Every structure is written in structure tokens, then in C-alpha cells.
């Protein structure tokens, strides 16, 4: 990875910190940690396994929960300066923004992580969730498709395809195809019943 790319992203990191610490998101875990709010109900949008550690964000009295996040981001900033090929560090920075709901800021860091981990379905799915959160459904689907190709049994990528096709784009045929694959891979996926109902309601509304 080129060092000028590191400098560019770290500049964005400094700007994002100013925005991020004004948020009061207190998300406990990463899988399902970014809820998808829909008229049909609250559909969880899983995005891979839990992060290595959980950083409190606005959860402590008096706003003290931001301090551990600030400290970790500063440490990670130095880490990627010194070791620009450290995929775990890039991913962790992205995870922090992801968990704060700052999807646009997270995208660049996930994209860098993907250049280092091109076949990691969890990172690809996280990237897709952030594309969706930033309003780009097509890029989200491309990331989810790459994750599915890397691991056809990666149920989170299939789940998110159903969400985008069925709830965002209102394409019931594509949503149902992804849903069939999801049910075959993981019939016990969290939130599956609610997701099926939401897709069915969306299809009924178009007929």
C-alpha cells in the first residue's frame, strides 16, 4: 500500500474523530449491531463476527465512553503509519466507524482492508453494509456478492442481499432467490422470520 494513501486516510480519520465523538451510539456487538429500520419492523443487518474488543462509545456517565475509543484510534493511527500493510489495524479502524454508524467514513478504511484481504467474507460484508448505509445499494450488492463467492456458506452476505433486494430496491424475485440460499445455508439465522415477512409484505405491496 502506498504511503500517500495512508496519509490521505489518516487525514480523514482526524476529521472523522471530530464528528464521531459527538455521537452517542452504544452498540454492544457487531453482528446485527447496525439495525436496519424498515416500515415492516426492525430487521437486523448482520455484518460479520464480533470485533476483537468492544469500545464503549458514549456509554459511560458524563460522556467518558469516548476516551477509550480516542485512545484506540490514536494507537491504530500510529500503527498504520508504521505498518501500512497491517490489515487488522485498517479493519479495526473501519469497525469503529461502522459501529458508530459513520458509514461514509468507514468505507475508505474497509476498502483498504479489502485490498489486503480480498477474499475475507466478513470484511467484504462489512464494506457492503457501509456502502448501503452511505446510500449506494449497487456497490453494497457487489460487495455482498464477492463475500458470497469467497464463502458460499457465509450467511450474513446472503442475509444482506435479501435486505437490499427486498427492502431497498423492491426487487422481490432477486430477494426471494437470495432468501432461498440463506435458508439453505442457515435456517436459524437471527431475524430470519421478520426478514421473510418484510419481503413478503413488500412483494404484496407491489402486486
Image (spheres, rainbow, N blue to C red):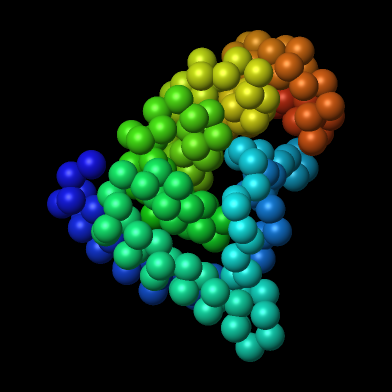
Res 114 seen here: yes
Residue at the image position 36 percent from the left and 47 percent from the top: 86
Please determine whether, in this image, residue 96 is positioned above or below residue 122: below
Location of residue 153 in the rendering, given as x and y in whole percent from the top left corner: 65, 18
Q: Which residue is more in the foreground, 15 or 3? A: 3
Q: Quadrant of residue 193?
A: top right
Please determine whether, in this image, residue 74 is positioned above or below residue 42: below
Q: Quadrant of residue 138?
A: top left
Res 141 seen here: no
Answer left or right for 31 relative to 13.
Answer: right
Location of residue 143 in the rendering, given as x and y in whole percent from the top left corner: 46, 28
Residue extending farthest front: 82
Answer left or right for 3 relative to 70.
Answer: left
Location of residue 151 in the rendering, given as x and y in whole percent from the top left corner: 57, 19
Q: Which residue is more in the foreground, 117 or 98? A: 117
Residue at the image position 41 percent from the left and 33 percent from the top: 117
Amino acid at each position: 500500500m502506498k504511503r500517500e494513501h495512508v496519509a490521505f486516510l489518516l487525514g480523514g480519520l482526524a476529521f472523522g474523530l471530530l464528528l464521531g465523538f459527538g455521537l452517542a451510539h452504544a452498540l454492544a456487538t457487531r453482528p446485527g449491531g447496525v439495525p436496519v429500520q424498515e416500515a415492516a419492523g426492525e430487521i437486523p443487518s448482520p455484518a460479520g463476527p464480533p470485533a476483537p474488543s468492544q469500545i464503549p462509545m458514549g456509554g459511560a456517565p458524563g460522556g467518558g465512553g469516548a476516551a477509550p475509543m480516542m485512545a484506540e484510534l490514536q494507537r491504530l493511527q500510529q500503527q498504520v503509519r508504521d505498518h501500512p500493510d497491517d490489515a487488522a489495524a485498517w479493519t479495526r479502524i473501519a469497525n469503529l466507524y461502522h459501529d458508530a454508524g459513520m458509514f461514509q467514513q468507514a468505507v475508505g478504511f474497509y476498502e483498504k482492508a479489502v485490498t489486503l484481504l480480498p477474499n475475507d467474507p466478513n470484511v467484504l460484508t462489512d464494506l457492503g453494509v457501509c456502502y448501503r448505509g452511505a446510500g449506494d445499494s449497487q456497490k453494497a450488492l457487489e460487495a455482498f456478492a464477492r463475500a458470497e463467492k469467497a464463502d458460499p456458506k457465509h450467511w450474513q452476505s446472503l442475509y444482506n442481499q435479501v435486505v437490499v433486494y427486498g427492502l431497498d430496491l423492491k426487487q422481490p424475485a432477486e430477494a426471494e432467490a437470495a432468501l432461498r440460499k440463506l435458508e439453505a445455508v442457515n435456517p436459524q439465522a437471527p431475524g430470519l422470520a421478520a426478514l421473510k415477512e418484510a419481503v413478503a409484505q413488500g412483494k404484496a405491496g407491489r402486486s
